[in-house]
Every structure is written in structure tokens, then in C-alpha cells.
Image: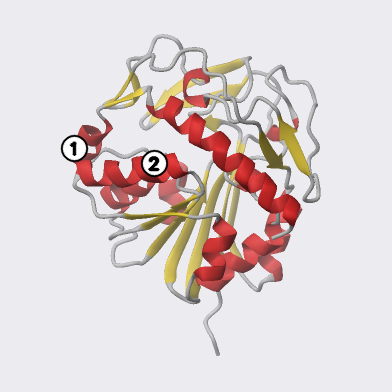
Amino acid sequence: MTTNGIEAHERNRASWNEATVAHNSHKVDQHLFFRSKGSTLYKEEKDVLGNLAGLKVCHLQCNAGQDTLSLVNKLGAQNPVGIDISDNAVDFATQLAKDSGIEASFIRADVFEFFDASEPDQFDVVFSSYGTVNWLSNMERYAAGVHRILKPGGRYCLVEFHPTAYIFNQDLVHEYPYTSNGQAVHEENGVNDYVALSATGDETEIMPNLKYTAGVQDFRNPNPSAEFCWGLADIIGSLAKTGLQLTHFKEYPYSNFFKMYKDMTPEKVEEGTRWHFTGPMLPLMYSISVTKPLRS
């Protein structure tokens, strides 16, 4: 990784350490939620991942581990491995797994360092979702790392916010590039409290049986962040360049749980809140699945 990439990732590590505390301050008794077989996965993740029973699963950029534990509760994964750069996120995830009585392992690591230190051909499924690609300083290196750790015949599944949606700020002003070609886009305000900002204002639950509380108020992150804009050609092209074969691609005109813009309409679905853009159709999410070919 270049010096600029290392600096950006470490800046983001500090920013996420602060934000993780704010995010989880709004979620009440999470261990009870997971002990009761609760899941934070939406339909899109469940559809693209399918049954994970008996498969070795790696969850990249797992944040505070809620989705990782949901892979066990909802899809049958056994002892999935979660990777995240944030110290606070991994500490929280490790304790949450213990308190929830769910077997899962969490490693604090930069994703590129994890790839370099990992044995090749070890995971049946590698998964990542929702606001992960924009923290990667090198898309081709990431794709190569995914290819490295997948077993032949293994799958990489991604559910992510659409790069077209990311070009607008919260006021729907075109502020960011569709692709920044690996150049960092600096955010002096750092990682925000998107949990609070995505609240509808009248809810008592984030999703069914996961309680919501006001928690940290008016969060201001003291640590700036650096994001990277990657277009679909960057993402799919980098994966294809490694030899991974595209088996699924789908776009969605809504955003699960995350209120991207100020002018959006909430819809209550089985898993929680889905946000709709009020103007003409705009793709807000997409999902991808690629497979590592079997060796001949």
C-alpha cells in the first residue's frame, strides 16, 4: 500500500473509532436481540448469500459485528471471521458475540494487511456490505486479495450503496466525482452518526425487536476521514481482472436503513426501514456475486 493509502486508512481508523461509540449508543440491549435469534440482515443480503451452513465465511469490514452475528442466526454460518480496521468496533463485536452466546471471531486489521497475512484458498464465502468500498484506497489490490483468500469455487458477495447515489451530498447537489481513480476525497467532519441521522424521528426500534434510544446527541467527530470514489467499472472490472467470474448483478431504487438525502421517504419493511428517493428513479444500491473458478 502506498504511503498515502496507509495514511488515509489510519486516518479512517481513528475516525471510525469515534463513530462506533456514537452508533452503538442508539442500540439498546443488543445481546438480548441476538440471543433471541435476531438478525440485522436485509432481504438483499440474504438473497445473494443464501444458506451458509457448513461453509467457511469471512466478513470484510464487519464494523461492530452485528451483521456477522446475523450470518450465524439467519443463514447458518458457523464461526464466521469478521475483519475491521477499527479497534473499538472489533472490541465491541468480540464482547457482543460473547454476551450473545454466538460463536464468531473478530480480527482488528487493515483489510490489505489481512490479505497479505492470510493463507490462500481458505474461505468458501467472502462478504462485505453497505459503505465499505468507499474506504478502499486501491480497488485492484482489494480484488486481488479477495481472489487470494477464496477457495476455488468460492463466492464473493457484495451489497453496497450505488456510486451514482454517492455523487450527491445530502441536499442533492452534485458534489463528488463518480470515480476518483484512487485519489482520496477528504471529509474534515469525519465519519458521521448515520444511525441517528437515519432515524425517522418517531421510532422505538431500529428494526423489529432491536430497541432504539436517543444515545449520543449532536455527535461531532474530532477525527477527519478520507474516502475513495469507485465507479461500477472500477469495481466489477477489478474483480474480473483477477479471473473472478460475475454470476449476479442487480441494482435497487432504494436504500436500506441509511437515509442518504434530506428529502427521502421511509418505508417500513420486514427488516426495518427502507428509504426512497422522492424524485425520478435513481439507483441507490446494488449487489454483486462473483465466483473463483475451479482449478482444472
Element type at mark 2: loop
- Residue at figure coordinates x 23%, y 49% from the top left: 102
**Quarter of the image containing the C terminus?**
bottom right
**Badge 1: residue crowd in 10 Å (few <14, some 14–19, many ≥20):** few
State whether residue 133 is above or below residue 118: above
Of pointers 1 and 2, the one earlier in the residue sequence = 1
**Badge 2: residue crowd in 10 Å (few <14, some 14–19, many ≥20):** many
Closer to the camera in the image, 253 or 12: 12
- Residue at figure coordinates x 52%, y 62% from the top left: 114
- Residue at figure coordinates x 63%, y 34% from the top left: 284
Closer to the camera in the image, 160 or 8: 8
State whether residue 29 is above or below residue 38: above
Element type at mark 1: loop
- Residue 270, can we see it? yes
- Left or right of residue 230, residue 149 in this image: left
- Residue at figure coordinates x 56%, y 69% from the top left: 116
Q: Which residue is mark 2?
A: 41
Return the x and y of residue 181 as percentages of the image width and height: 81, 50
Q: Quadrant of residue 293?
A: bottom right
- Left or right of residue 234, residue 195 in this image: left
- Left or right of residue 123, residue 27 in this image: left
* Amino acid at circle 2: Leu
- Residue 245, can we see it? no
* Amino acid at circle 1: Ser
Return the x and y of residue 97 as percentages of the image width and height: 27, 46
Return the x and y of residue 257 as percentages of the image width and height: 48, 29
State whether residue 81 is above or below residue 87: below
Return the x and y of residue 70 as percentages of the image width and height: 33, 45
State whether residue 144 is above or below residue 190: below
Please give the label number shown on residue 36: 1
